[in-house]
Amino acid sequence: MASSRLFEAYPPFPVDVPTAILPKISLDKLSSGSEAEANELFHACRTKGFFLLDLQNEPAGDGLLRDIEALFAITREVMDLSLEEKTEYKQHPPLLGYKAAGIMKNEKGQPDRCEFFNVGQDDIRGNIPRRANPKPVQDNRETFMSFMDNASRVLFRIFGILEAQLGLPTGTLAALHRQDQPSGTVVRMIRYPPQTPRDHGSSLLNHTDYGTITMLCNVLGGLQILPPGASNEDSNWQYVKPQPNCVIVNLGDALVEWTGDILRSNEHRVIAAPGKQAEHARFSVAFLVRPERKVSMKRLVGGKIPTAAEDGKEELSVSADEWELKKAVALIAGADCARSKGGRELRTTNVPVKVG
Ligand SMILES: O=C(O)CCC(=O)C(=O)O
Ligand SMILES: [Fe+2]
């Protein structure tokens, strides 16, 4: 997640809890063109759908680390506002603003324990008329802008690697995520209350993210992933250990859809932070990258991506916003939409890219 300073305020992550082994990819090495690092990133995107990204010693990464630190302080300020004030910014479509704890349910039908506030890229970049936001957001719009700028530089670096590895023309993914076009991309500030050992059930229900990519900034543990092939039983879930100067990156369902199931979106959830960490309120900042609203969710054509025809599948002819709405409704209804997806083999030969 973020700089080591943020970690020093809390008890350490315990050594005796089941912890996922995730590769730690260096942004600096990716930016210097390391093929080995790019291969490792791609492998993680296909097999786990999650990796740690070390942001140090790379200009956008170092900038992002500073922005993350500032955003953690802003998140605290926003969450410390009274429930009454936060409720003034209650979410209604397009899902910007405040969601109180308990609005969603966990797997046991208990109220969720996660409150969050979504700040839209569209709002910050002026793609829509400026929204009303609480003072800690309005006073810090430049911090949100800087965060989105730096995070997007990192995002486009990752896109470039995915495009190259998939054999797609450079810029294919970037063209679906132009920053001056309306999208559901948000910075999500999250707070989970401290928990007592008597609290059972998850704080945030198991799910996959339905967008493109998520960059998650965590300091305390509590995030868990279900390893590939494992069934949804408590004993199978593994913690993701947050690490200083790193963000946790996970892929969303849109990338699985566009790549005909090559890339993987993995199931995750949030439970109480492990050990003594549970006594503290847990804050997260997530950059949830979603496609431009009007782009097609049809499978991308070219490179190592099997065609829908080869798979005998009908093309999905919906736009990203229609697709997201369906996913959001299913999630609220508790429909079975949480399962990990993707991770199949690549085509061994390239699909020729159509010209004209
Ligand atoms: O708070 C976290 O660590 C995870 C949040 C998450 O999974 C989400 O917002 O989609
Ligand atoms: Fe998530």
Image: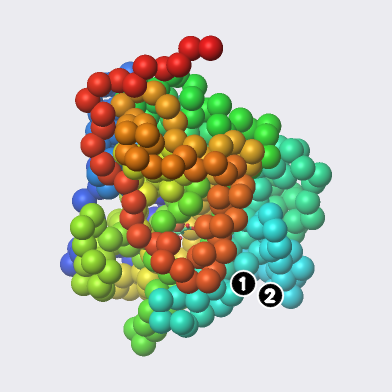
The residue lying at 32 percent from left, 46 percent from top is: 342
Camera-side residue of 240 and 82: 240
Quadrant assignment, res 133:
bottom right
Q: Residues within 10 Å of mark 1 (few under 14, many from 20)?
A: some
Give the residue at x 27% y 69%.
Answer: 232
Question: 62 or 178: nearer the eye?
Answer: 178
Residue type at tag 1: Ala
Mark drawn on residue 100: 1
Label 1 residue SS: loop
Say if residue 192 shows up in the picture: no
Q: Is residue 330 left or right of residue 227?
A: right
The reply to whether callout 2 and callout 1 are in contact (CB within 8 Å) is: yes
Vertical position of residue 234 compared to residue 126: above or below:
below
* Residue visible at 41% across and 17% down in the picture: 353
Image coords of residue 317 (percent x, y):
54, 41
Residue type at tag 2: Leu
Residue 286 badge: none
Note whether 222 is above or below 112 in the view shown: above
Q: Is residue 238 left or right of residue 313?
A: left
Q: Residue at x 56, y 52 (%)?
A: 324
Which type of secondary structure does the marked residue at label 2 adopt? helix
x then y, percent, for residue 305:
34, 30
| Mark 2 lies on residue | 83
- Number of marks present in the image shown: 2
